[in-house]
Amino acid sequence: MLKYQIFFGTIVLLIILKKFFAFKRKEIKGSKFFLFLIFWLSVFLAIIFPEETNKIARFFNITRGADFFIYISIMVIFYLLFKIYQRLENIEGNITKIVREIALLKKEEDK
Amino acid sequence: MIDKNKIVVLMTALNEAKVISNVLNGLINSGYKNIVLVDDGSTDETYNIAKRYDIFLLRHVVNRGKGASLQTGTEFILKNTNFEVIVHFDADGQHNPEDIENLVRPILEEGFDVVFGSRFLGEVENMPYIRKIVLKFGILISNFLYGVKLTDVHNGLRAFKREVFKKIVFTEDRFSYASELLEKVVKNGFKYKEVPVKIVYTEYSISKGQKNINAFNIFFHMIKRRFFA
């Protein structure tokens, strides 16, 4: 096993352990933990068996496994950005509702 | 002469302490005594100055934007008053109270639901060249996206029949509310027209008004609303 595999493999295992304890403490839902586990186990396997990723990549007509992972990562990042943007918009909207309610209630009180 | 008692002027203000007195005096001296002012989280003396006037004054505890403030003022008007016509008027001194009569007449006498003020049909003083280009570009895009033929889209001087706001609720908090408004006016089939108005750009109003860079933000929101909402 190469040094980078030990280094990154350990980090991924620590991330999985951290989430596992959070799941035990019921801080995250089972379905979310399951998705999280699938994702990070895939990353772990890709680190330990890098040659295997080439096979998956070739299945999608991509030459190298590393390229395949970069494409997947870009897609995931864009998806997450979109989700964060949506959540931010919701929060902004909720703040406006609260501020408006306060303004209208205060006016009622002043009458 | 129109009956000014049927009209309420809705203004929003953010840090307008330098000019708010002049603007309020101008409106009151022109006979528009029904004024709703939403202070949008000003950190200067705007709110305290406005308190001295006999107007409906509301305050956002933090800044939420022009669209959000107009919605707050509108909700107040619909819930607490019976005015027939709502006029949007900027608090930075760019607008002329004399224009309100021309805006309101088509609503009270000709059956229009919405009347937009157009600086490009009327008069505009000291407008920076770059602002003119940005506005003209915005008008082109809006006309294309919403299938209308307007000459001015982001002018804050406009009038509405009260009932319009039973169907139009601003969800865009910031300046893109103007595009949202146009979209909803078209979608709901409201009868609208433009009338000429006068806009005077001063050093103060230019420094206070929308930044040209905001155009990109507004454009992004227009595309989002048109194709992804």
Image: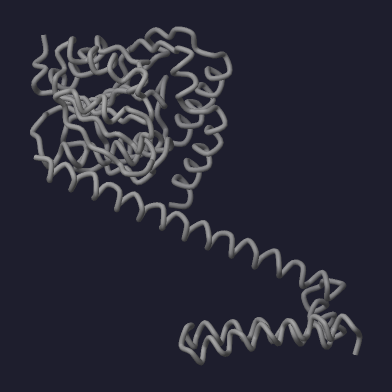
> Residue B221 location in percent, x, y?
48, 43
> Residue B136 location in percent, x, y?
51, 21
Image quadrant in which the N terminus of chain B is located: top left
Image-based side of A2 in relation to A88, left or right: right
Please tell me whether residue B99 is drawn above or below residue B170 in the rendered image.
above
Q: In which quarter of the image is residue A8?
A: bottom right
Please tell me whether residue B69 is drawn above or below residue A42 in the rendered image.
above
Say which of B14 and B176 sits in front.
B14
> Residue A6 location in percent, x, y?
84, 86
Say which of B216 and A8 sits in front.
A8
Q: In which quarter of the image is residue B27?
A: top left
Image-based side of B143 in relation to A42, left or right: left
Say which of B170 and B187 sits in front.
B170
Please tell me whether residue A89 is drawn above or below residue B109 in the rendered image.
below
Residue at the spot x=27%, y=34% of the render?
A: B38
Say which of B122 and A45 sits in front.
A45
Residue at the spot x=49%, y=21% of the render?
A: B207
Image-based side of B33 in relation to B103, left or right: left
Which residue in the rendered view is the most extreme toward the bottom? A24
The total number of labels drawn is: 0
Residue at the spot x=47%, y=40% of the render?
A: B222
> Residue B96 location in percent, x, y?
30, 12
Q: What colour-coding does the image apply?
A: one colour
Please tell me whether residue B226 is drawn above or below residue B100 in the rendered image.
below
Residue at the spot x=9%, y=40% of the render?
A: A111
Image-based side of A105 in relation to B63, left or right: left
